[in-house]
Amino acid sequence: LAFSVVMLAVFLRSETRAIEPLIPLSLFRNPIISLCSVAVFVLGMGMFGVIIYLPLFMQGVLGTSATQSGNLLTPLMLGAVVGSVVTGQLNLRLGSYKIAAVSGSILVAAGMILFARMGAATQRADVILAMIIARTGMGLLQPVYTVAVQNVAPRKQMGAATASTAFFRSIGSTMGVAIFGSVLLTSYHHDLTIGIPPDTPPAALKLFSNPLLLVQLRPKLDATFGQTAAGRHLLQMLLANVRTGLLNGLQRIFFASAVIMTLAIILHVL
């Protein structure tokens, strides 16, 4: 992290001197471009960081298969398509992207709040509803940033300005996935170790170190623990702890994202 901060300073210094900079820093003197950059960064962190872990929630907590969780993600794409079409029509008919921006941010926040309310007893229909609402909001928002930036950017810097929105969204989603992943693993290991019987072999516990791989390792787990009745009982106990650990960790992620996206409404109202 320290090295990254130093290299960021070096990069910014280089950009101020370059004849053709990758990211013209003069663009960010415009308040609309600066605001869009911050807003798209927050959207990437809060929304994309959650989407990555939704399949884990559906498989590890709700008990769906990988195929079923993939099918359940289909509403995410449908919502994005609907939101993008609506944004285009609103911008065309009203001559303003403010309504689409505010409406989209409210829908994303509402979807994140629904995610934060999910628990072990959540029905698949509730997950689908939350995904449709959140992704429709994203569909409304994403074209807004591009249009807003292109409307105010100098013509010779149009390409760099347009690309900057995708760049900040990518950086935000990368940071969101990393931060949320750390929160998830910390919570997961804490909850898992609390319920482990003292006589559990350490070698067996290594298979539970990464919850993201448990679905692929399930046949190996059954073979390792299924040789005796005591082993099968221990496996069921550990899997129950895994489910609890995943649920607590994912709920923390969803709650944090709900807070982030609710605060992001302010950015779009400005």
Image (cartoon, helix red, strand yellow):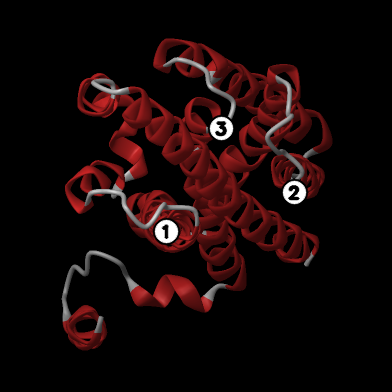
Left/right placement of residue 146 relative to residue 2 reads right
The residues bearing labels 3 and 2 have C-alpha atoms spaced at a distance of 23 Å
Of circles 1 and 3, the one toward us is 1
Residue 15 is situated, as x and y percent measured from the top left of the image, at 22, 78
The residue wearing badge 3 is 61
Which mark identifies residue 245? none
Q: Quadrant of the C terminus?
A: bottom right
Residue type at the position of mark 3: Val
The residues bearing labels 1 and 2 have C-alpha atoms spaced at a distance of 34 Å
- Whether residue 13 is visible: no
Image point (40%, 49%), residue name: 166
Secondary structure under tag 1 reads helix
Which quadrant of the structure image shows residue 174?
bottom left
Residue 252 is situated, as x and y percent measured from the top left of the image, at 61, 57
Residue type at the position of mark 2: Ala
The residue wearing badge 2 is 109
Q: Earlier in the sequence, mark 1 or mark 3?
A: 3
The residue wearing badge 1 is 193
Image point (39%, 52%), residue name: 158
- Whether residue 93 is visible: yes
Residue type at the position of mark 1: Thr
Q: How many residues crowd around disc 1 within 10 Å: few (fewer than 14), some, or many (20 or more)?
A: some
Residue 253 is situated, as x and y percent measured from the top left of the image, at 57, 54
Q: Earlier in the sequence, mark 3 or mark 2?
A: 3
Q: How many residues crowd around disc 3 within 10 Å: few (fewer than 14), some, or many (20 or more)?
A: many
Secondary structure under tag 2 reads helix
Q: Quadrant of the N terminus?
A: bottom left
Which quadrant of the structure image shows residue 12?
bottom left
